[in-house]
Amino acid sequence: MGPGKSRYRERPVGVKILADTVHENAALKTGTLFGADELVINMGPQHPSTHGVLRVKLKLDGERVVGSECVIGYLHRGVEKIAENRTYQQFAPYVDRMDYVAAVSNGLGYCEAVEKLLVVEAPPRARVIRTILTELQRIASHLLWLGTHALDIGALTPLFYCMREREEILKIFEKYCGARLTTHAFRIGGLQYEAYDNLEKDVERFCKDFEGRIQEYSDLLTGNSIWIGRTRNVGLLNSADCIALGASGPVLRASGVKWDLRKAMPYAAYDQYKFEIPVGTRGDTYDRYMVRIEEMRQSRLICLQAIENIPAGPIMARVGKVLKPPVGEVYHAIESPKGILGYYILSDGSTQPYRIRIRPPSFINLQALDKMIRGHLVTDVVAIIGTLDIVLGEVDR
Amino acid sequence: MADESKAPQSPESSQPEVTGSSPAQSAAGASPSSPAKTAAPAPLQVPLNNELSGRYRERFGAVILDAIEDRKQSILIVDAAQLLEIACYSRDEEKFDLLEDYTAVDWPRREKRFDLVAQLYSFTHNTRLRLKIPLGFDEQPDTIVPIWPAANWLEREIFDLFGIAFRGHPNLKRILLPDEWQGHPLRKDYDILQQDTAWVRENLGIESGQ
Protein backbone atom coordinates (compact mmCIF):
# COMPACT_ATOMS: atom_id res chain seq x y z
CA MET A 1 0.00 0.00 0.00
CA GLY A 2 1.47 3.30 -1.04
CA PRO A 3 2.23 5.90 1.61
CA GLY A 4 -0.57 8.34 2.24
CA LYS A 5 -3.01 6.24 0.22
CA SER A 6 -4.16 3.88 2.91
CA ARG A 7 -7.81 3.59 3.63
CA TYR A 8 -7.18 4.67 7.16
CA ARG A 9 -6.10 8.15 6.14
CA GLU A 10 -8.98 8.59 3.80
CA ARG A 11 -11.67 7.75 6.26
CA PRO A 12 -11.38 10.92 8.35
CA VAL A 13 -11.65 13.00 5.22
CA GLY A 14 -14.94 11.33 4.45
CA VAL A 15 -16.14 12.00 7.97
CA LYS A 16 -15.25 15.65 7.55
CA ILE A 17 -17.34 16.00 4.44
CA LEU A 18 -20.28 14.33 6.15
CA ALA A 19 -19.89 16.54 9.18
CA ASP A 20 -19.81 19.63 7.03
CA THR A 21 -23.02 18.60 5.36
CA VAL A 22 -24.65 18.05 8.73
CA HIS A 23 -23.41 21.45 9.87
CA GLU A 24 -24.85 23.13 6.85
CA ASN A 25 -28.19 21.39 7.05
CA ALA A 26 -28.49 22.05 10.74
CA ALA A 27 -27.45 25.63 10.39
CA LEU A 28 -30.01 26.04 7.67
CA LYS A 29 -32.77 24.64 9.82
CA THR A 30 -32.11 26.11 13.21
CA GLY A 31 -29.17 28.39 12.80
CA THR A 32 -27.76 27.18 16.10
CA LEU A 33 -27.63 23.40 16.29
CA PHE A 34 -24.18 22.08 15.33
CA GLY A 35 -23.07 25.60 14.66
CA ALA A 36 -19.45 26.34 13.98
CA ASP A 37 -18.78 26.65 17.70
CA GLU A 38 -15.34 25.55 18.79
CA LEU A 39 -14.95 23.23 21.67
CA VAL A 40 -12.07 23.44 24.12
CA ILE A 41 -11.06 20.23 25.80
CA ASN A 42 -8.26 19.34 28.15
CA MET A 43 -5.88 16.55 27.40
CA GLY A 44 -3.93 15.67 30.50
CA PRO A 45 -2.26 16.31 32.85
CA GLN A 46 -3.19 12.76 33.80
CA HIS A 47 -3.45 11.18 30.41
CA PRO A 48 -1.49 8.05 29.57
CA SER A 49 -0.41 9.26 26.16
CA THR A 50 1.14 12.52 27.31
CA HIS A 51 4.07 10.65 28.85
CA GLY A 52 3.92 12.47 32.12
CA VAL A 53 2.12 15.50 33.40
CA LEU A 54 1.64 17.46 30.23
CA ARG A 55 -1.64 19.25 29.80
CA VAL A 56 -2.70 20.35 26.35
CA LYS A 57 -5.71 22.56 25.90
CA LEU A 58 -7.12 21.64 22.53
CA LYS A 59 -9.42 23.88 20.61
CA LEU A 60 -11.50 21.62 18.42
CA ASP A 61 -13.76 21.98 15.46
CA GLY A 62 -15.48 18.61 15.58
CA GLU A 63 -12.60 16.14 15.81
CA ARG A 64 -10.15 18.50 14.19
CA VAL A 65 -7.64 20.59 16.13
CA VAL A 66 -7.71 24.26 15.26
CA GLY A 67 -5.50 25.51 18.06
CA SER A 68 -3.74 24.38 21.18
CA GLU A 69 -1.93 25.54 24.24
CA CYS A 70 0.48 23.55 26.36
CA VAL A 71 0.27 23.94 30.11
CA ILE A 72 3.47 22.75 31.72
CA GLY A 73 5.29 23.16 34.99
CA TYR A 74 3.66 20.42 37.03
CA LEU A 75 7.07 18.87 37.65
CA HIS A 76 8.96 22.11 38.16
CA ARG A 77 11.53 21.62 40.90
CA GLY A 78 13.71 24.65 40.29
CA VAL A 79 16.75 22.68 39.21
CA GLU A 80 18.59 25.82 38.18
CA LYS A 81 17.96 27.41 41.57
CA ILE A 82 19.14 24.26 43.35
CA ALA A 83 22.34 24.42 41.30
CA GLU A 84 23.19 27.84 42.69
CA ASN A 85 23.04 26.42 46.19
CA ARG A 86 25.14 23.31 45.66
CA THR A 87 28.78 22.75 44.84
CA TYR A 88 29.68 21.61 41.35
CA GLN A 89 29.98 17.97 42.40
CA GLN A 90 26.86 18.04 44.54
CA PHE A 91 24.79 19.19 41.61
CA ALA A 92 25.88 16.36 39.30
CA PRO A 93 23.25 13.83 40.51
CA TYR A 94 20.49 16.39 40.01
CA VAL A 95 21.01 16.54 36.25
CA ASP A 96 20.17 12.81 36.04
CA ARG A 97 16.69 13.64 37.23
CA MET A 98 15.86 15.93 34.33
CA ASP A 99 15.73 13.54 31.40
CA TYR A 100 15.45 10.48 33.59
CA VAL A 101 15.32 8.03 30.72
CA ALA A 102 18.67 9.31 29.44
CA ALA A 103 20.48 10.13 32.65
CA VAL A 104 23.89 9.19 31.30
CA SER A 105 23.61 11.76 28.51
CA ASN A 106 22.65 14.47 30.97
CA GLY A 107 25.62 13.60 33.12
CA LEU A 108 27.99 13.64 30.18
CA GLY A 109 26.89 17.12 29.16
CA TYR A 110 27.20 18.49 32.66
CA CYS A 111 30.59 16.94 33.40
CA GLU A 112 32.02 18.12 30.10
CA ALA A 113 30.67 21.62 30.64
CA VAL A 114 32.27 21.89 34.07
CA GLU A 115 35.49 20.45 32.67
CA LYS A 116 35.49 23.15 30.03
CA LEU A 117 34.94 25.71 32.75
CA LEU A 118 37.88 24.29 34.68
CA VAL A 119 39.95 24.04 31.50
CA VAL A 120 40.48 20.34 32.16
CA GLU A 121 40.15 17.44 29.77
CA ALA A 122 39.07 13.96 30.72
CA PRO A 123 41.71 11.34 29.85
CA PRO A 124 41.24 9.31 26.63
CA ARG A 125 40.20 6.15 28.44
CA ALA A 126 37.47 7.99 30.29
CA ARG A 127 36.29 9.63 27.09
CA VAL A 128 35.92 6.31 25.28
CA ILE A 129 34.06 4.65 28.14
CA ARG A 130 31.83 7.70 28.36
CA THR A 131 31.08 7.39 24.66
CA ILE A 132 30.15 3.71 24.97
CA LEU A 133 27.79 4.29 27.88
CA THR A 134 26.25 7.36 26.29
CA GLU A 135 25.54 5.52 23.06
CA LEU A 136 24.01 2.62 24.98
CA GLN A 137 21.88 5.21 26.73
CA ARG A 138 20.79 6.62 23.40
CA ILE A 139 19.67 3.16 22.34
CA ALA A 140 17.85 2.67 25.65
CA SER A 141 16.13 6.03 25.35
CA HIS A 142 15.08 5.38 21.76
CA LEU A 143 13.84 1.93 22.73
CA LEU A 144 11.63 3.32 25.45
CA TRP A 145 10.41 5.92 23.00
CA LEU A 146 9.67 3.32 20.34
CA GLY A 147 7.80 1.05 22.73
CA THR A 148 5.60 3.76 24.20
CA HIS A 149 5.07 5.55 20.90
CA ALA A 150 3.88 2.33 19.29
CA LEU A 151 1.72 1.64 22.33
CA ASP A 152 0.10 5.07 22.01
CA ILE A 153 -0.78 4.36 18.43
CA GLY A 154 -2.18 0.94 19.25
CA ALA A 155 0.65 -1.51 18.61
CA LEU A 156 1.08 -3.32 21.91
CA THR A 157 3.74 -5.84 20.99
CA PRO A 158 6.81 -3.65 20.37
CA LEU A 159 6.71 -2.37 23.95
CA PHE A 160 7.55 -5.78 25.36
CA TYR A 161 10.39 -6.35 22.93
CA CYS A 162 11.79 -2.86 23.51
CA MET A 163 11.69 -3.27 27.28
CA ARG A 164 13.51 -6.60 26.94
CA GLU A 165 16.40 -4.96 25.05
CA ARG A 166 16.43 -1.93 27.28
CA GLU A 167 16.76 -4.24 30.25
CA GLU A 168 20.03 -5.58 28.83
CA ILE A 169 21.42 -2.06 28.66
CA LEU A 170 20.24 -1.23 32.16
CA LYS A 171 21.96 -4.37 33.39
CA ILE A 172 25.23 -3.12 31.91
CA PHE A 173 24.71 0.21 33.69
CA GLU A 174 23.94 -1.58 36.91
CA LYS A 175 27.08 -3.65 36.65
CA TYR A 176 29.09 -0.55 35.86
CA CYS A 177 27.89 1.89 38.50
CA GLY A 178 25.24 0.14 40.57
CA ALA A 179 22.31 2.18 39.32
CA ARG A 180 19.93 1.55 36.48
CA LEU A 181 18.04 4.76 35.90
CA THR A 182 19.59 7.77 37.59
CA THR A 183 23.08 6.50 37.11
CA HIS A 184 25.38 9.39 37.98
CA ALA A 185 27.89 7.39 35.94
CA PHE A 186 30.49 10.09 35.32
CA ARG A 187 32.45 12.46 37.50
CA ILE A 188 33.79 15.89 36.74
CA GLY A 189 37.22 15.14 35.28
CA GLY A 190 36.54 11.60 34.13
CA LEU A 191 35.03 8.54 35.72
CA GLN A 192 34.77 7.42 39.29
CA TYR A 193 34.63 3.73 38.46
CA GLU A 194 36.98 1.70 36.35
CA ALA A 195 35.20 -0.39 33.73
CA TYR A 196 34.34 -3.80 35.13
CA ASP A 197 36.11 -6.83 33.72
CA ASN A 198 33.67 -7.96 31.10
CA LEU A 199 32.25 -4.63 30.01
CA GLU A 200 33.49 -5.05 26.46
CA LYS A 201 32.09 -8.58 26.27
CA ASP A 202 28.72 -7.51 27.63
CA VAL A 203 28.50 -4.63 25.18
CA GLU A 204 29.61 -6.85 22.34
CA ARG A 205 27.04 -9.51 23.17
CA PHE A 206 24.33 -6.91 23.35
CA CYS A 207 25.36 -5.38 20.03
CA LYS A 208 25.48 -8.77 18.32
CA ASP A 209 21.97 -9.63 19.49
CA PHE A 210 20.64 -6.19 18.87
CA GLU A 211 21.26 -6.20 15.15
CA GLY A 212 18.59 -8.83 14.59
CA ARG A 213 16.32 -7.30 17.17
CA ILE A 214 16.12 -3.96 15.39
CA GLN A 215 15.16 -5.88 12.31
CA GLU A 216 12.35 -7.46 14.29
CA TYR A 217 10.91 -4.06 15.20
CA SER A 218 11.25 -2.96 11.64
CA ASP A 219 9.39 -6.05 10.49
CA LEU A 220 6.63 -5.29 12.94
CA LEU A 221 6.20 -1.64 12.06
CA THR A 222 8.05 -0.28 9.05
CA GLY A 223 5.91 -1.88 6.38
CA ASN A 224 2.80 -2.21 8.50
CA SER A 225 -0.05 -0.48 6.72
CA ILE A 226 -1.77 0.58 9.94
CA TRP A 227 1.47 2.06 11.19
CA ILE A 228 2.04 3.87 7.92
CA GLY A 229 -1.54 5.08 7.92
CA ARG A 230 -1.22 6.49 11.40
CA THR A 231 2.17 8.14 10.89
CA ARG A 232 2.62 9.11 7.22
CA ASN A 233 1.98 12.83 6.69
CA VAL A 234 1.03 13.25 10.32
CA GLY A 235 2.66 16.10 12.21
CA LEU A 236 4.54 17.62 9.31
CA LEU A 237 7.33 20.01 10.19
CA ASN A 238 9.63 21.30 7.48
CA SER A 239 13.26 22.18 8.02
CA ALA A 240 12.74 25.95 8.02
CA ASP A 241 10.11 25.66 10.76
CA CYS A 242 12.31 23.30 12.74
CA ILE A 243 15.17 25.76 12.76
CA ALA A 244 12.94 28.75 13.47
CA LEU A 245 11.34 26.94 16.40
CA GLY A 246 14.66 25.62 17.62
CA ALA A 247 13.63 21.97 17.29
CA SER A 248 16.67 19.71 17.32
CA GLY A 249 17.69 16.09 17.41
CA PRO A 250 15.74 13.47 15.45
CA VAL A 251 12.94 15.99 14.84
CA LEU A 252 15.32 18.25 12.94
CA ARG A 253 17.00 15.40 11.09
CA ALA A 254 13.68 13.89 10.01
CA SER A 255 12.90 17.14 8.23
CA GLY A 256 15.99 16.70 6.10
CA VAL A 257 18.69 18.66 7.91
CA LYS A 258 21.78 16.48 8.06
CA TRP A 259 23.13 17.88 11.27
CA ASP A 260 24.28 16.23 14.43
CA LEU A 261 26.36 17.84 17.17
CA ARG A 262 28.43 14.67 17.41
CA LYS A 263 29.70 15.49 13.92
CA ALA A 264 29.39 19.26 13.89
CA MET A 265 31.23 19.91 17.17
CA PRO A 266 32.58 16.54 18.32
CA TYR A 267 32.91 15.93 22.04
CA ALA A 268 33.85 12.88 24.14
CA ALA A 269 35.47 10.48 21.63
CA TYR A 270 33.04 10.83 18.73
CA ASP A 271 35.68 12.18 16.35
CA GLN A 272 37.33 8.75 16.34
CA TYR A 273 34.35 6.77 15.09
CA LYS A 274 32.62 6.39 11.78
CA PHE A 275 28.87 6.74 11.71
CA GLU A 276 26.18 8.15 9.50
CA ILE A 277 23.61 10.81 10.25
CA PRO A 278 20.24 9.44 9.17
CA VAL A 279 17.88 11.99 7.69
CA GLY A 280 14.27 11.99 6.58
CA THR A 281 12.71 13.79 3.67
CA ARG A 282 9.19 14.81 4.63
CA GLY A 283 9.46 15.64 8.30
CA ASP A 284 6.44 13.55 9.30
CA THR A 285 5.93 11.11 12.14
CA TYR A 286 6.97 8.17 9.96
CA ASP A 287 10.27 9.85 9.05
CA ARG A 288 11.02 10.56 12.68
CA TYR A 289 10.39 6.90 13.39
CA MET A 290 12.77 5.84 10.63
CA VAL A 291 15.44 8.31 11.77
CA ARG A 292 15.37 6.99 15.33
CA ILE A 293 15.47 3.37 14.20
CA GLU A 294 18.50 4.14 12.05
CA GLU A 295 20.10 6.09 14.90
CA MET A 296 19.91 2.99 17.05
CA ARG A 297 21.74 1.07 14.35
CA GLN A 298 24.41 3.78 14.17
CA SER A 299 24.78 3.88 17.95
CA ARG A 300 25.30 0.17 17.88
CA LEU A 301 28.08 0.62 15.32
CA ILE A 302 29.72 3.31 17.48
CA CYS A 303 29.66 0.97 20.48
CA LEU A 304 31.23 -1.83 18.45
CA GLN A 305 34.00 0.44 17.21
CA ALA A 306 34.61 1.83 20.68
CA ILE A 307 34.96 -1.48 22.51
CA GLU A 308 37.55 -2.64 20.02
CA ASN A 309 40.07 -0.20 21.30
CA ILE A 310 39.60 1.21 24.77
CA PRO A 311 42.87 2.97 25.54
CA ALA A 312 44.64 2.15 28.77
CA GLY A 313 45.53 4.83 31.26
CA PRO A 314 44.02 6.87 34.03
CA ILE A 315 40.29 7.47 34.19
CA MET A 316 40.39 10.77 36.08
CA ALA A 317 42.07 14.00 35.14
CA ARG A 318 43.80 15.81 37.97
CA VAL A 319 41.09 17.92 39.47
CA GLY A 320 41.06 19.07 43.06
CA LYS A 321 38.72 17.70 45.68
CA VAL A 322 37.33 21.21 46.01
CA LEU A 323 36.38 22.59 42.63
CA LYS A 324 36.74 26.32 42.20
CA PRO A 325 36.56 27.04 38.49
CA PRO A 326 38.23 30.29 37.45
CA VAL A 327 35.88 33.23 36.98
CA GLY A 328 34.13 33.14 33.66
CA GLU A 329 31.48 31.34 31.72
CA VAL A 330 31.08 28.51 29.31
CA TYR A 331 28.37 27.05 27.11
CA HIS A 332 28.64 23.43 26.17
CA ALA A 333 26.09 21.38 24.31
CA ILE A 334 25.83 17.72 23.43
CA GLU A 335 23.54 15.72 21.19
CA SER A 336 21.31 13.98 23.71
CA PRO A 337 18.79 11.41 22.47
CA LYS A 338 16.20 14.19 22.42
CA GLY A 339 18.24 16.94 20.78
CA ILE A 340 20.62 19.70 21.77
CA LEU A 341 21.24 19.54 25.49
CA GLY A 342 23.18 22.63 26.51
CA TYR A 343 24.69 23.80 29.76
CA TYR A 344 25.55 27.45 30.31
CA ILE A 345 27.58 27.77 33.48
CA LEU A 346 28.78 30.98 35.03
CA SER A 347 31.46 30.81 37.69
CA ASP A 348 32.27 33.55 40.18
CA GLY A 349 35.36 31.71 41.36
CA SER A 350 33.67 30.08 44.35
CA THR A 351 32.81 26.43 44.95
CA GLN A 352 29.21 26.98 43.87
CA PRO A 353 28.14 27.98 40.39
CA TYR A 354 26.86 31.53 40.11
CA ARG A 355 24.32 30.40 37.56
CA ILE A 356 23.63 27.22 35.64
CA ARG A 357 21.27 27.34 32.75
CA ILE A 358 20.17 24.10 31.16
CA ARG A 359 18.96 24.18 27.59
CA PRO A 360 16.41 21.39 27.62
CA PRO A 361 15.77 19.82 24.21
CA SER A 362 12.32 18.49 25.21
CA PHE A 363 11.11 21.91 26.33
CA ILE A 364 12.07 23.58 23.08
CA ASN A 365 10.91 20.71 20.87
CA LEU A 366 7.54 20.79 22.62
CA GLN A 367 7.08 24.33 21.35
CA ALA A 368 6.61 22.89 17.88
CA LEU A 369 3.60 20.85 19.02
CA ASP A 370 1.06 23.56 18.25
CA LYS A 371 2.26 23.91 14.69
CA MET A 372 2.35 20.17 14.16
CA ILE A 373 -1.12 19.26 15.43
CA ARG A 374 -3.15 21.97 13.73
CA GLY A 375 -5.56 20.47 11.25
CA HIS A 376 -5.13 16.96 12.60
CA LEU A 377 -7.54 14.76 14.49
CA VAL A 378 -7.42 14.26 18.24
CA THR A 379 -6.12 10.73 17.73
CA ASP A 380 -3.21 12.17 15.77
CA VAL A 381 -2.35 14.45 18.68
CA VAL A 382 -1.45 11.31 20.60
CA ALA A 383 0.86 10.21 17.81
CA ILE A 384 2.46 13.65 17.54
CA ILE A 385 3.14 14.03 21.26
CA GLY A 386 4.75 10.61 21.08
CA THR A 387 6.87 11.44 18.08
CA LEU A 388 8.37 14.50 19.79
CA ASP A 389 9.83 12.19 22.43
CA ILE A 390 9.46 14.54 25.36
CA VAL A 391 10.28 13.79 28.95
CA LEU A 392 8.39 16.02 31.33
CA GLY A 393 11.10 15.90 33.94
CA GLU A 394 13.23 17.80 31.48
CA VAL A 395 10.50 20.08 30.17
CA ASP A 396 9.66 21.34 33.65
CA ARG A 397 13.00 20.95 35.38
CA MET B 1 28.26 54.33 27.52
CA ALA B 2 30.83 51.67 26.90
CA ASP B 3 32.74 52.39 30.12
CA GLU B 4 29.63 52.58 32.17
CA SER B 5 28.47 49.10 31.34
CA LYS B 6 31.89 47.54 31.22
CA ALA B 7 32.61 48.31 34.84
CA PRO B 8 29.79 46.21 36.28
CA GLN B 9 30.88 43.19 34.25
CA SER B 10 32.66 42.04 37.35
CA PRO B 11 33.70 38.57 36.24
CA GLU B 12 35.48 39.82 33.18
CA SER B 13 37.17 42.85 34.64
CA SER B 14 38.47 41.18 37.77
CA GLN B 15 39.53 38.05 35.99
CA PRO B 16 43.35 38.08 35.99
CA GLU B 17 43.52 38.87 39.69
CA VAL B 18 41.23 36.00 40.66
CA THR B 19 42.97 33.48 38.47
CA GLY B 20 46.22 34.34 40.19
CA SER B 21 44.74 34.12 43.66
CA SER B 22 43.49 30.56 43.29
CA PRO B 23 46.34 28.80 41.58
CA ALA B 24 45.61 25.33 42.90
CA GLN B 25 42.21 25.17 41.30
CA SER B 26 42.69 27.13 38.15
CA ALA B 27 45.79 25.24 37.16
CA ALA B 28 44.32 21.85 37.92
CA GLY B 29 44.22 20.96 34.26
CA ALA B 30 47.43 22.53 33.13
CA SER B 31 49.91 22.05 35.93
CA PRO B 32 48.94 20.92 39.37
CA SER B 33 52.21 21.47 41.15
CA SER B 34 54.67 23.98 39.76
CA PRO B 35 54.03 27.54 40.92
CA ALA B 36 56.03 28.95 38.02
CA LYS B 37 53.41 27.82 35.57
CA THR B 38 50.47 29.41 37.37
CA ALA B 39 51.55 32.80 36.16
CA ALA B 40 52.22 31.58 32.66
CA PRO B 41 48.90 30.23 31.28
CA ALA B 42 47.16 32.47 28.86
CA PRO B 43 44.30 34.39 30.42
CA LEU B 44 40.96 32.69 29.87
CA GLN B 45 39.24 35.91 28.89
CA VAL B 46 40.70 38.04 26.17
CA PRO B 47 39.22 40.81 24.06
CA LEU B 48 37.56 39.44 20.95
CA ASN B 49 39.12 40.88 17.83
CA ASN B 50 38.16 38.72 14.92
CA GLU B 51 36.39 39.38 11.65
CA LEU B 52 33.02 38.64 13.16
CA SER B 53 33.30 41.19 15.95
CA GLY B 54 34.81 43.61 13.43
CA ARG B 55 31.76 43.36 11.21
CA TYR B 56 29.43 43.88 14.14
CA ARG B 57 31.40 46.89 15.34
CA GLU B 58 31.49 48.38 11.88
CA ARG B 59 27.77 47.95 11.47
CA PHE B 60 26.59 48.97 14.93
CA GLY B 61 29.45 51.03 16.39
CA ALA B 62 28.93 51.98 20.01
CA VAL B 63 25.92 49.68 20.35
CA ILE B 64 28.42 46.83 20.66
CA LEU B 65 29.55 47.64 24.17
CA ASP B 66 32.25 45.03 24.37
CA ALA B 67 33.52 41.89 22.68
CA ILE B 68 35.14 39.17 24.74
CA GLU B 69 36.44 35.71 24.15
CA ASP B 70 36.08 33.44 27.16
CA ARG B 71 37.53 29.93 26.90
CA LYS B 72 37.58 30.36 23.12
CA GLN B 73 33.86 31.19 23.00
CA SER B 74 32.83 34.45 21.40
CA ILE B 75 30.72 36.88 23.41
CA LEU B 76 29.30 40.21 22.28
CA ILE B 77 27.87 42.56 24.86
CA VAL B 78 25.26 44.69 23.17
CA ASP B 79 22.95 47.52 24.09
CA ALA B 80 19.32 46.57 24.67
CA ALA B 81 18.06 49.57 22.71
CA GLN B 82 19.00 48.01 19.37
CA LEU B 83 18.38 44.39 20.26
CA LEU B 84 15.94 43.83 17.40
CA GLU B 85 18.25 45.28 14.76
CA ILE B 86 21.16 43.21 16.03
CA ALA B 87 19.05 40.06 16.16
CA CYS B 88 17.80 40.66 12.64
CA TYR B 89 21.32 41.31 11.36
CA SER B 90 22.63 38.20 13.14
CA ARG B 91 20.04 36.00 11.54
CA ASP B 92 20.00 37.43 8.02
CA GLU B 93 23.54 38.64 7.40
CA GLU B 94 25.65 36.52 9.72
CA LYS B 95 23.45 33.42 9.24
CA PHE B 96 22.93 32.69 12.91
CA ASP B 97 19.70 30.96 12.05
CA LEU B 98 19.26 28.98 15.24
CA LEU B 99 18.51 30.58 18.58
CA GLU B 100 19.87 27.76 20.68
CA ASP B 101 19.10 29.23 24.05
CA TYR B 102 17.89 32.45 25.63
CA THR B 103 18.17 33.08 29.32
CA ALA B 104 19.04 35.67 31.93
CA VAL B 105 21.47 36.19 34.79
CA ASP B 106 20.84 38.32 37.85
CA TRP B 107 23.57 40.63 39.17
CA PRO B 108 21.83 42.34 42.11
CA ARG B 109 24.75 44.58 43.00
CA ARG B 110 25.31 45.85 39.50
CA GLU B 111 23.89 49.09 38.19
CA LYS B 112 22.33 47.24 35.27
CA ARG B 113 20.88 44.38 37.20
CA PHE B 114 20.19 41.71 34.58
CA ASP B 115 21.99 40.18 31.65
CA LEU B 116 19.99 38.57 28.90
CA VAL B 117 22.07 35.81 27.34
CA ALA B 118 21.33 34.47 23.87
CA GLN B 119 23.25 31.52 22.42
CA LEU B 120 23.23 31.67 18.65
CA TYR B 121 24.29 28.96 16.27
CA SER B 122 24.99 29.16 12.58
CA PHE B 123 24.44 26.04 10.49
CA THR B 124 26.24 27.68 7.59
CA HIS B 125 29.46 28.42 9.45
CA ASN B 126 29.16 25.87 12.28
CA THR B 127 29.93 28.56 14.84
CA ARG B 128 28.36 29.83 18.00
CA LEU B 129 28.00 33.37 19.22
CA ARG B 130 26.76 34.55 22.58
CA LEU B 131 24.95 37.85 22.86
CA LYS B 132 24.75 39.43 26.30
CA ILE B 133 22.35 42.27 26.80
CA PRO B 134 22.67 44.23 30.07
CA LEU B 135 19.32 45.43 31.37
CA GLY B 136 18.41 47.82 34.14
CA PHE B 137 15.80 46.84 36.72
CA ASP B 138 12.32 47.27 35.24
CA GLU B 139 13.76 47.87 31.82
CA GLN B 140 11.69 46.20 29.12
CA PRO B 141 13.62 44.73 26.21
CA ASP B 142 12.03 44.11 22.84
CA THR B 143 10.85 40.61 22.17
CA ILE B 144 12.87 38.69 19.59
CA VAL B 145 10.02 36.29 18.78
CA PRO B 146 9.56 37.85 15.31
CA ILE B 147 13.18 37.01 14.51
CA TRP B 148 13.39 33.58 16.14
CA PRO B 149 10.01 32.04 17.04
CA ALA B 150 11.91 29.70 19.37
CA ALA B 151 12.21 32.64 21.75
CA ASN B 152 8.50 32.45 22.58
CA TRP B 153 8.64 29.99 25.46
CA LEU B 154 12.17 31.01 26.39
CA GLU B 155 11.09 34.60 26.96
CA ARG B 156 8.09 33.39 28.93
CA GLU B 157 10.47 31.39 31.08
CA ILE B 158 12.67 34.42 31.66
CA PHE B 159 9.59 36.45 32.52
CA ASP B 160 8.46 33.73 34.89
CA LEU B 161 11.70 33.16 36.74
CA PHE B 162 13.36 36.59 36.53
CA GLY B 163 10.45 38.98 36.10
CA ILE B 164 11.76 40.59 32.94
CA ALA B 165 8.85 41.69 30.77
CA PHE B 166 9.36 41.63 27.02
CA ARG B 167 7.80 44.40 24.97
CA GLY B 168 5.62 43.03 22.16
CA HIS B 169 5.63 39.39 23.23
CA PRO B 170 2.57 37.60 21.79
CA ASN B 171 1.62 35.75 24.97
CA LEU B 172 3.61 36.94 27.94
CA LYS B 173 2.56 34.92 30.97
CA ARG B 174 4.15 32.50 33.37
CA ILE B 175 5.07 29.13 31.95
CA LEU B 176 6.59 26.94 34.67
CA LEU B 177 5.04 28.43 37.80
CA PRO B 178 1.32 28.91 38.41
CA ASP B 179 -0.11 32.09 36.92
CA GLU B 180 -0.95 33.62 40.30
CA TRP B 181 2.45 32.94 41.88
CA GLN B 182 4.15 35.93 43.49
CA GLY B 183 7.89 36.39 43.07
CA HIS B 184 10.56 35.37 40.60
CA PRO B 185 12.63 32.47 41.95
CA LEU B 186 15.81 32.79 39.93
CA ARG B 187 16.48 36.29 41.21
CA LYS B 188 19.33 36.28 43.67
CA ASP B 189 17.23 37.89 46.42
CA TYR B 190 14.74 35.00 46.29
CA ASP B 191 15.94 32.53 48.88
CA ILE B 192 15.98 28.84 48.04
CA LEU B 193 13.54 28.11 50.90
CA GLN B 194 11.27 30.97 49.97
CA GLN B 195 7.94 30.30 48.31
CA ASP B 196 4.57 31.87 47.82
CA THR B 197 3.07 30.53 51.04
CA ALA B 198 -0.27 32.20 50.43
CA TRP B 199 -0.61 30.42 47.10
CA VAL B 200 0.44 27.10 48.58
CA ARG B 201 -2.05 27.41 51.44
CA GLU B 202 -4.88 28.42 49.19
CA ASN B 203 -4.34 25.97 46.35
CA LEU B 204 -2.76 22.97 47.97
CA GLY B 205 -4.40 23.22 51.38
CA ILE B 206 -1.12 22.74 53.23
CA GLU B 207 0.93 25.13 55.31
CA SER B 208 4.18 24.69 53.45
CA GLY B 209 5.56 22.83 50.49
CA GLN B 210 8.92 22.31 52.14
Image: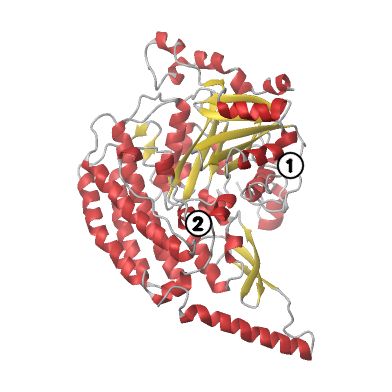
Judging by the rendered image, the residue that carries numbered circle 2 is: A390
Q: Position of residue A4 (x, y in %)?
A: 47, 74
**Quadrant of residue A167 within the rendered picture:** bottom left
CA gap between label 2 and label 1 equals 30 Å
Instruction: Give the residue displayed 48% in from the left and 42% down from the top.
Output: A94
> Looking at the image, is mark 2 or mark 1 nearer the viewer?
1
Q: Are marks 2 and 1 in contact (CB under 8 Å)?
A: no
* Badge 2 element: loop
Q: Tell me if A182 is positioned left or right of B191 in this view.
A: left
Extreme-top residue of the structure: B36
Q: Could you tell me the amino acid type at mark 1? A: Asp
Quarter of the rendering occupied by the N terminus of chain A: bottom left
Identify the subunit bearing mark 2.
A
Judging by the rendered image, the residue that carries numbered circle 1 is: B142
Q: Tell me if B13 is positioned left or right of A149 in this view.
A: right
**Quadrant of residue A186 within the rendered picture:** top left
In the foreground, A253 or B160:
A253
Instruction: Give the residue displayed 71% in from the left and 22% down from the top.
Output: B2
Q: Position of residue B204 (x, y in %)?
A: 66, 57
Asked whether residue B205 is in view, the answer is: no
* Badge 1 element: loop
Q: Position of residue A44 (x, y in %)?
A: 58, 66
